[in-house]
């Protein structure tokens, strides 16, 4: 029971850190990045529609709220659980563990955002600036969630009202975080390319098992490296195609 409580606190603190960081980085900073991209497009493209139906120059409450809820909150929930899983393996990299996590996220999932088929990257603003800003969001999320997790974990381990409130919020965040993560993991078979998500899930499960059974460290690191290497090849290839000829 004590072990389960410790695991719950660990995942809950990471989930809460992920939600807060996701809202700030994925939601608010993501909106700012889009605004900068639109601003650098020049007056000729003001009012044009992006590939997802948004109008350049328009900043609406509904659009911002949707970005915060469906991008910031959702990615924060899943990202928090993901950080809770890999955090034990990142401790050797302190104080650069947050940057390492963000870089791993960029390498592993960057191709899903930095998509060469998305003409908006070249159509609006500077393609190089757009790539740098969206890549920076991955790094910012990694740094933010690691920094906040350390402070939430220290706070929860303490005493007093603030510690109890933080622990309650962590436990409340744990439930939707696990549910959303399971739903995302369970939907991989419906994707056009399910093999990569399956590789990612299997790698995390194996790394968790290796940590639990105290297997040699290189085994766990190798498991975690597999999806990063595969994802990085797709991300780098997409970036090369996107920036070709610029």
Image: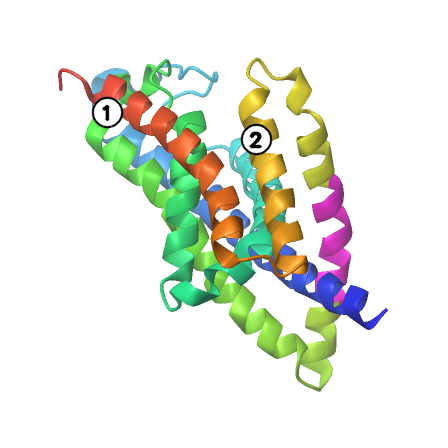
x 48%, y 50%: residue:
221
Among the two numbered marks 2 and 1 on one chain, the one whose residue lies closer to the N terminus: 1
Q: How is the image coloured?
A: rainbow
The disc label shown at residue 41, or none: 1
Residue stretch rendered in magenta on the structure: 168-179
Question: Compared with residue 204, is residue 88 higher up or lower down, i.e. above or below?
Answer: below
Quadrant of the image containing the N terminus? bottom right
Between the residue at mark 2 and the residue at mark 1, the CA separation in whole angstroms equals 39 Å
Q: Position of residue 29 (x, y in %)?
A: 41, 45
Work out whether residue 10 or residue 134 is closer to the camera in this orientation and state it.
10
Query: Looking at the image, which residue is at 40% across and 27% down?
Result: 111
Q: What number is the disc on residue 213?
A: none
Quadrant showing the C terminus: top left
Q: Residue at x 55, y 36 (%)?
A: 71
The disc label shown at residue 199, or none:
2
**Proximity of marks 2 and 1: CB atoms separated by less than 8 Å:** no
Characterize the local packing of mark 1: few (<14), some (14-19) or many (20 or more) Cα atoms within 10 angstroms: some
Q: Is residue 221 magenta?
A: no
Residue 187 in view in this figure: yes
């Amino acid at each position: 029971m004590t072990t389960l409580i410790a695991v719950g606190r660990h995942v809950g603190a990471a989930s809460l850190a992920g939600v807060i960081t996701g809202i700030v980085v994925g939601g608010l900073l993501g909106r700012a990045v889009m605004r900068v991209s639109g601003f650098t497009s020049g007056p000729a493209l003001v009012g044009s529609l992006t590939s997802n139906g948004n109008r350049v120059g328009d900043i609406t409450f509904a659009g911002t709220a949707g970005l915060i809820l469906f991008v910031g909150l959702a990615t924060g929930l899943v990202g928090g659980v993901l950080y809770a899983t890999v955090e034990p393996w990142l401790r050797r990299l302190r104080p650069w563990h947050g940057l390492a996590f963000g870089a791993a996220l960029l390498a592993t999932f960057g191709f899903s955002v930095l998509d060469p088929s998305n003409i908006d990257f070249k159509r609006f603003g500077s393609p190089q600036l757009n790539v740098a800003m969206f890549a920076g969001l991955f790094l910012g999320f990694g740094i933010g969630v690691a920094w906040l997790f350390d402070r939430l974990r220290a706070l929860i381990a303490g005493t007093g009202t603030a510690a109890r409130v933080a622990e309650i919020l962590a436990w409340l965040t744990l439930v939707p975080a696990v549910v959303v993560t399971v739903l995302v993991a369970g939907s991989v078979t419906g994707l056009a390319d399910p093999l990569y998500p399956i590789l990612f899930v299997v790698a995390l499960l194996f790394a968790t098992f290796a940590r639990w059974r105290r297997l040699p460290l290189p085994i766990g690191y190798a498991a975690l490296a597999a999806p990063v290497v595969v994802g990085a090849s797709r991300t780098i290839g997409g970036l090369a195609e996107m920036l070709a000829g610029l």
